[in-house]
Each structure stands twice: as C-alpha cells, then as structure tokens.
Image (spheres, rainbow, N blue to C red):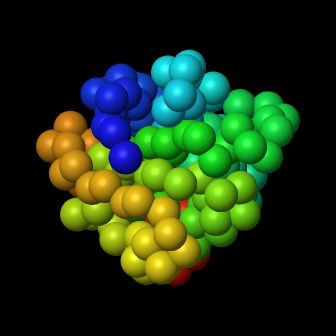
Amino acid sequence: MSGKYDSVGLQIAYEEAQKGYDEGGVPIGGCMINNVTGEVLGRGHNMRFQKCSATLHGEISTLENCGRLAGKVYKQCTLYTSLSPCDMCTGAIIMYGIPRVVISENKTFKSPGEEYLQTRGAEVVVEEDERCIGLMEKFIKERPSDWFEDIGE
C-alpha cells in the first residue's frame, strides 16, 4: 500500500506527542488519514494524566477525535502513532479493521501488538523517528513511575 501521506501523518503524530508532553502527559500522539482522499480524519494524544483516564492512550484519543465513522471508512485509512501500540490500542485497530499502521518508533517500547496486527492482515511500518525516540526517552527518564503506570507495569 502507498505511503503517500506518511510524512504528513508522522509529523502530526510527533506534534501531538509533543503537545501531550507539554501538557504534563505521556508524549504519545497520532492521527488517522483516509488513504483515498488524503483527509486527516482525526488527531489526538495520550490524555491519561490530563483527564485522569485509564484508557485515553494516544491511539484511542485519535479514534475518539475522528468521531463516528462508517465501518467502510476505517478500512481505507492509515493510523499513525508516535509509539508502538499497546495491546488495548492494537485491539481497537483490529476491531475497526484499519489496514495500515505507521509507527514513528518502537525503540523505547515495542508491543507484541505489532506482530499481532500483522497476523491479522494489517501492514505495519516502523520509521524509527529520532524526534519521537528522544521525546520518549526524556519522558521515561523524568517520570519512570508514570511511564510504568501507562503501560500497566
């Protein structure tokens, strides 16, 4: 599948991750782009600390900000995320049948979800974006207990 909108999607994911960090949250961001139209359907970032939420990870926030979409729309999209999606976010990607996931980095955290997405037919692309790696390393060093809480450890 084409990566026609990858630079836009990766830039938005980074911007959202930085926004999350600047707000005092976990720096994970994302967006979803329709591969057919090029439209950015939604963007978001981890809001667990800002909203005292157990579930508002970056990918979930992105999907929430897309609003309700017809099932067929998800199947023509790419979800961009600044970090390897956890099991919860992987489940949402599978549930909606999103066929392509572009991950900015999986050096600081690599979820088994990447392989599971592939076994379920999704294309998974990992970019190793140094900006996202640096931002996550900084966050983990500054707030290790908050990081471990976010990934359920």
120 vs 63, left or right, is left
Using the image as rendered, state which of residue 92 and residue 14 is in the foreground: 92
44 vs 28, left or right, is right
130 vs 58, left or right, is left
Residue 96: x and y in percent read 71, 55
Where on the picture, by quarter, is residue 39? top right
Residue for point 22% across, 63% down = 107
- Would you say residue 106 is visible in this rendering? yes
Residue 144 position (above or below residue 19): below
- Would you say residue 142 is visible in this rendering? no
Using the image as rendered, state which of residue 76 and residue 58 is in the foreground: 76
Total marks placed = 0
- Specify the farthest residue to the left: 130
Using the image as rendered, state which of residue 145 and residue 65 is in the foreground: 65
Residue for point 71% across, 31% down = 65
Residue for point 37% across, 46% down = 1
Where on the picture, by quarter, is residue 137? bottom left
Residue for point 41% across, 59% down = 123
Residue 73: x and y in percent read 70, 38
Residue 50 position (above or below residue 118): above
Residue 93 position (above or below residue 149): above
Residue 132: x and y in percent read 27, 43
36 vs 147, left or right, is right
Residue 103: x and y in percent read 35, 51
Residue 111 position (above or below residue 79): below
